[in-house]
Image (cartoon, rainbow, N blue to C red):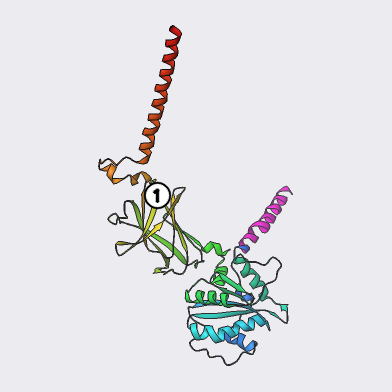
Amino acid sequence: MKKKNVFLILLFMVTTFIIPSSVGAAGLDLSRYTSENLSDAFTDEAITGVDYGKYTDSGDKVVVYLFRGKGCRNCINFLNYVKDTLIPKYGDKFKIISYKVAESGVSNTNFNLLDKTASFLNGQSSNGTYATPYIVIGDQAFSGAIDSEKKAQIEAMIQSDTRYNVLEEMVKGTTNVEDNKNFTDGGITFTTNKALSSNHTLKVSNINAQNIKLGDFNYIAAYDISMYNGSTIVPLSGGSFRIKIPVSTKYDIYKVAYIKNGTVAEEISATYENGFVSFTTTHLSEYAVYGKNKSDNISTDIQNGEKNPDTLDSIQLYGTLFTLGCFMLLGSMIVYNRKKKSSM
């Protein structure tokens, strides 16, 4: 009887803790939600006269996710903006996947997908409501009335040719957008302000750049830092990237040089903390790390054994010593005179 009870307890623990955790690790099931292509959305909102030009709903392009409510005035305005501006200017660069999240003010199953997506992007609503349209490009979300500022940001995202696909990452089981912003290799850490695909990997290799000088700084090390998708280099641009490189040689000041064609193409200020030199850049390439101590700035005249002319500081020192000497002489004379009078 006791053995049976032990078995039941173990079975309860397995079903309660192990099974739910494995289910929770599974990725998003998109088959539970209903999507529509751009032409479906146009038809649903009775938008006509669309010239699709080079636009197609297929191909490897920037994906724009549109969560909309039927009859929503801001949603209709956005679709007209797509028709009149985005398709004529960037029709071959993007595609729209639409999810209707409400009709006649009533939410449907797709609203759950909107909520999951916003949570993934660290923008989940505190009151369970969202302004529509809710638009996601890369790792950026735009909602409500799409004004001129948002339009400029949307067009910049399309032009940046981002391949980050938020729903694809959720399907893979990625838990949060931040999981795709930090990459490491060989002790070097790369952090991006815009999430990258989980298919990307950071690859770092040591290079020899000792012959490349940077003023009076001492050469420490150099690296070729690149992002790959499989065997293909990913050309990163339009972002801000923070790179941390482990450095064991301690200096007072550090600098990093962007190396191009064997020469210094750019000098970059760097900071040192907890054994790492950190700097910010907008691209990946070859970088060399340099350092020097503040004492290295000693005047070359002194180093060459030449005497600098006296300065005001020296004059003040001599003046102080002269004054002290006068007081000491005067004090001695007073003491002498007193002794002389007392002996008479």
Q: Is 257 located above or below residue 145 in the figure? A: above
Q: Estimate the x, y position of residue 136 in percent, counting from the top left.
A: 58, 73
Q: Is 309 located above or below residue 6 in the figure? A: above
Q: Amino acid at mark 1?
A: Ile
Figure quadrant of residue 317: top left
- Of residue 279 and residue 8, the one placed in the foreground of this image is 279
- Mark 1 element type: strand
Quarter holding the C terminus is: top left
Relative horizontal placement of residue 216, taking residue 51 as reference (left or right) = left
Q: Would you call the spot at circle 1 few (<14 residues within 10 Å), some (14-19), or many (20 or more)?
A: some
Figure quadrant of residue 19: bottom right
Which residue is at a point 67% across and 67% down the rendered structure image?
A: 125
State whether residue 91 appears in this view. Answer: no
Q: Magenta residues, as a range?
A: 1-23
Image mark count: 1
The residue carrying mark 1 is 253
The residue lying furthest to the bottom in this view is 49
Relative horizontal placement of residue 41, taking residue 264 as reference (left or right) = right
Q: Is residue 11 magenta?
A: yes
Q: Estimate the x, y position of residue 9 in percent, counting from the top left.
A: 70, 52
